[in-house]
Image (cartoon, rainbow, N blue to C red):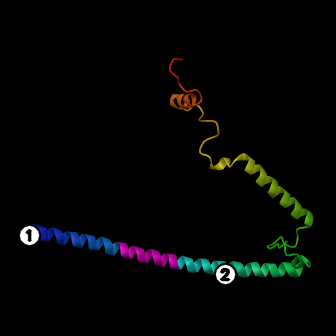
Amino acid sequence: MSEIGFGLQVTALGMGTVIAILVALMLVLRAIGWWDQRRQSRAEAARAAALAQAQAEADASWPGQGDDPALVLSGPAAGRLSDEDIAAITLAVVSHARLRRLQGAPEVRAHTPGSHLFASRWVANGRASQHQPWRRGN
C-alpha cells in the first residue's frame, strides 16, 4: 500500500512540474506577443507619418494633384510621373494580370499539367473503366 502513496506523489510532482513549465511558457509567449504588437503599432504610426509628410510634399510640389481624389501618388517619383507614364504603367499591370489569370497560377501547381496522365497502369485502367465500363458478354 505504501507504493501507491509513492506513485501518487511522483505523479503529482511530475504533473505539477509540467503544468508549471507550460504556464511559464504561456507567459513568455504572451509577453513576446505584447512586445511585438507594440513594435508594430509604432512602425505603423511612423509609416503613416512618413506617408502624410510625403503626400504633403507632393501636393506642394505638384499643383493640381490634390484636386483629383482618384489619383493620389506618393513617394519619391510622385511629382515626376506624367499622365502618359501612369497610363503605360496601368496598361502593363492590367495586361500582366490578364496574362497570369489565363495561365491558371502555374506557380502553385505541384506538377506540370498533363505530366501525370499515365502515372501508372492502375490510373490508366481506372480512367478507361470510367469511360468504357465492363459489360457481361462482351
Question: Which mark is first along the chain, 1 or 2?
Answer: 1
In the rendered structure, the answer to whether residue 62 lies left or right of residue 55 reads right
Pointer 1: residues within 10 angstroms few (<14), some, or many (20+)? few
The residue under label 1 is 2
- SS category of the residue bearing label 2: helix
* Labels 2, 1: front one: 1
Please, what is the dominant secondary structure of the magenta stretch? helix
In the rendered structure, the answer to whether residue 135 lies left or right of residue 17 reads right
Dividing the picture into quarters, in which one does residue 40 lie?
A: bottom right
Residue stretch rendered in magenta on the structure? 22-34
Residue 32, percent across and down? Answer: 49, 76
- Where 136 falls versus 86 (above or below)? above
Q: Is residue 25 magenta?
A: yes
Q: Amino acid at mark 2?
A: Ala
Q: Is residue 32 magenta?
A: yes
Q: Residue at x 41, y 74 (%)?
A: 26
Residue 43, percent across and down? Answer: 64, 78
As rendered, which of 18 and 125 lies closer to the eye? 125
In the rendered structure, the answer to whether residue 61 lies left or right of residue 8 reads right
Residue 37, labelled with which disc? none
The residue under label 2 is 45
Q: Residue at x 23, y 73 (%)?
A: 13
Alpha carbon distance from label 2 to label 1: 65 Å
